[in-house]
Image (spheres, rainbow, N blue to C red):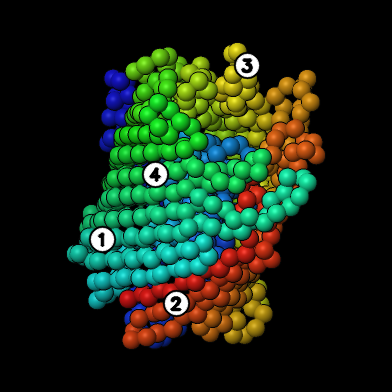
């Protein structure tokens, strides 16, 4: 423990912070002209930050409002190179896999601080409503800046969620938004957001919503002999989200913000449909609370400081009526506590050379009630990152070295092994022509992820002897953007080719006495291409149009054992071809948006034989919205029709997705 504190304390006077200065549009309506301008402005559905040294995809601002999306999970489906694991319905778990390296290799950051789950390593993106999100960034490798906590360097890829910050024009003190969504599955989803200017340097915001639905929808099922149409049962949800934030901007150029987040849900778990079993008696209750704060200050022109802190409490209660114990149906309770401190710093040595040093300390504790042979683990994680950045004319270079120290202990049974590692990352970009916004980029990153508490300690399946799962990533890409006042107002072309290798992949395999156990026996080679084209042509004088096309080619091959029949077969659930298309048109006070997602053929096991084959699927979504003023308040009405062609499909085998469904939204900004 002593060396951890020394590492953290040594960085306290030298902290760093990098924050996007995206300015959200104020919801207040000052005049009719102002409102009309806002309704008529063009929207770039996606953008790529061409000044970023690492590949990044961005969805932000008004563009988020144009998507047929209820949560963050719905929006990130349209990024290239991702697979969204969706178990169906309003309350179904939704997790993200980037470039086939696994969900646990994706870091999810909320307002610059990582969201964690030491139990299973996943973050349910369905918990985060778009009503309170201003911007979503997906970075391959890591955020393209050295001004970040050490956690920012520790994932193979990262999603950054930026919540909406209160912004006030002169004379404004209060903003608010009230909205109600309703639609299929018995959905009722009211929400409210209030922003208050307390002083010239301090403002507050509170955002809350309630989501209710019975989750029932029709689906088609076949067992190979006959087809039937059934109704999905035990998929209802009641969920409440409350967020509060304080934002301070002071005269000495320092800034501070604090956030409280609380999520409470009860949901049915409809389960997989196997052997003609259509009903599952599982249920889950979730309570998640975290409090986090961040302080950023610049000292002169050379030195920047950032301090972050967070506390998280997570409670899960799980009921399975199909398993009867001495005390009745199986009821397990899991509790997690997380404590996090971060200190980071940047110093500008010269006009072209920056250096940074950051250190994080995190403590995770977990207990489980009524779970046999659970070890009750505690994990101590210390990270220290040294980074540098060079601006050499038209060449940008970044590099960092991340040191990680993991210590594990348990109250019962055997604990996992301590682990330490030193991992490098190098990123380079080159702009060959000064007058053209064309950039070539490349990166190399070596990183790992620790086994989760479930991997190591869950009943008889866990294996405390597991090693971390390692990845090596290589990427080369090209990006070009162009803005003009002519016919083609915006054009962007982005292409990346990549190779990744996953070593010591953690998988469930037969172990002692033929019992299933988590083991390090997997290896995966991943080859891929991500490509996107985005453009905003002026097709008609009064109509603003935007188009986006994204495509991913990916071969993710199992290279575990040359003697196995599935050697160099495509791994489960990864399509070779996938893509999306979005078209948006804005005229006067009307907006129309069409989106299309395609996922090619896949296999639900690593052996590519017809028995495990999954057919391609696609969905088309359509929305129409209009805005108008009523007593100086902006009112917006939206109608959505999703899965227009009523296609039946599974994202995860035996977890059927909804067919055609609708959603209606009404909101008032004041």
| Depth order, front residue of 61/225 | 225
Q: Position of residue 424 (x, y in %)?
A: 53, 30
Where is mark 3, residue-wise?
514
- Answer above or below: position of 186 versus 404: below
Q: Quadrant of the N terminus?
A: top left
Furthest residue in direction left, as rendered = 199
| Distance between the alpha carbons at the discs numbered 2 and 3 | 60 Å
Where is mark 2, residue-wise?
636
Q: Is residue 515 visible?
A: yes
Position of 178 with respect to 592 (left or right) is left
**Label 3 neighbourhood size at 10 Å, few (<14), some (14-19), many (20+)?**
few
Q: In the rendering, which numbered label is found on residue 443?
A: none
Residue drawn at (46%, 80%) of the image: 627
**Quadrant of residue 310 within the rendered picture:** top left
Which numbered disc, 1 or 3, marks the residue that appears first in the sequence? 1
Position of 14 with respect to 234 (left or right) is left
**Quadrant of residue 533 within the rendered picture:** bottom right
| Depth order, front residue of 130/386 | 130
Q: Position of residue 593 (x, y in %)?
A: 59, 71
Where is mark 4, residue-wise?
285
């Amino acid at each position: 423990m002593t060396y951890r504190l020394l590492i953290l304390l040594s960085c306290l006077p030298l902290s760093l912070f990098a924050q996007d200065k995206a300015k959200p549009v104020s919801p207040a309506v000052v005049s009719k002209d102002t409102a009309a301008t806002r309704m008529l402005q063009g929207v770039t559905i996606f953008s790529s930050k061409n000044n970023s040294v690492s590949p990044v995809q961005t969805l932000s601002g008004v563009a988020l409002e144009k998507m047929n999306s209820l949560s963050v999970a719905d929006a990130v489906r349209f990024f290239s190179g991702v697979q969204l694991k969706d178990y169906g319905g309003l309350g179904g778990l939704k997790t993200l896999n980037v470039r086939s390296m696994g969900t646990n290799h994706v870091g999810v950051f909320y307002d610059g601080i990582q969201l964690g789950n030491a139990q299973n390593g996943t973050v349910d993106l369905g918990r985060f409503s778009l009503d309170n999100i201003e911007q979503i960034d997906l970075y391959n490798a890591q955020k393209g800046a050295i001004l970040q906590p050490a956690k920012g360097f520790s994932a193979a890829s990262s999603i950054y969620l930026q919540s909406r910050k209160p912004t006030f024009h002169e004379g404004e003190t209060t903003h608010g938004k009230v909205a109600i969504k309703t639609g299929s599955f018995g959905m009722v989803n009211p929400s409210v957001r209030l922003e208050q200017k307390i002083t010239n340097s301090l403002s507050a915001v509170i955002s809350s919503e309630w989501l209710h639905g019975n989750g029932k929808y029709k689906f088609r099922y076949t067992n190979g002999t006959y087809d039937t149409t059934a109704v999905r049962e035990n998929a209802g949800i009641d969920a409440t989200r409350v967020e509060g934030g304080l934002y301070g901007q002071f005269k000495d150029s320092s800034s501070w913000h604090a956030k409280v987040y609380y999520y409470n849900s009860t949901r049915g778990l409809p389960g997989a449909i196997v052997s003609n079993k259509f009903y599952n008696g599982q249920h889950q209750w979730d309570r998640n609370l975290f409090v986090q704060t961040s302080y950023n200050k610049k000292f002169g022109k050379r030195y920047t400081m950032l301090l972050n802190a967070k506390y998280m409490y997570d409670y899960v209660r799980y009921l399975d009526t199909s398993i009867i114990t001495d005390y009745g149906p199986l009821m397990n309770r899991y509790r997690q506590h997380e404590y996090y401190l971060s200190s980071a710093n940047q110093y500008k040595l010269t006009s072209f050379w920056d250096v940074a040093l950051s250190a994080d300390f995190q403590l995770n504790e977990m207990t489980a009630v009524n779970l046999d042979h659970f070890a009750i683990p505690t994990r101590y994680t210390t990270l220290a990152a040294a980074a540098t950045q060079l601006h050499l004319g038209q060449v940008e270079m970044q590099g960092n070295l991340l040191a990680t120290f993991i210590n594990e202990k348990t109250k019962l049974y055997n604990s996992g092994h301590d682990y330490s590692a030193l991992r490098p990352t190098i990123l380079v970009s080159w702009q060959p022509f000064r007058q053209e916004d064309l950039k070539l980029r490349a990166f190399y990153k070596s990183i790992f992820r620790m086994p989760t508490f479930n991997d190591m300690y869950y009943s008889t399946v866990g294996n405390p002897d597991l090693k971390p799962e390692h990845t090596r990533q290589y990427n080369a890409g090209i990006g070009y953007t162009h803005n003009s006042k002519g016919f083609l107002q915006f054009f962007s072309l982005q292409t990346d080719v990549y190779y990744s290798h996953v070593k010591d992949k953690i998988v469930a395999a037969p172990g002692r006495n033929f019992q299933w156990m988590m083991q390090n026996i997997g290896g995966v080679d991943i080859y891929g291409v991500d490509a996107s084209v985005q453009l905003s042509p002026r097709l008609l004088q009064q109509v603003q149009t935007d188009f986006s096309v994204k495509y991913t080619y990916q071969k993710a091959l199992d290279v575990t054992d040359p003697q196995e029949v599935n050697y160099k077969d495509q791994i489960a659930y990864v399509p070779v071809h996938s893509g999306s298309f979005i078209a948006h048109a804005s005229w006067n006070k009307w907006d129309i948006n069409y989106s299309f997602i395609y996922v090619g053929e896949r296999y639900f096991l690593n052996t590519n034989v017809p028995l495990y084959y999954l057919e391609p699927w696609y969905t088309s979504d359509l929305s129409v919205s209009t805005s108008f003023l009523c007593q100086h308040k902006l009112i917006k009405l939206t109608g959505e029709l999703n899965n227009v062609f009523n296609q039946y499909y599974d994202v995860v085998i035996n977890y059927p997705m909804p067919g055609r469904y609708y959603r209606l939204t009404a909101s008032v900004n004041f």
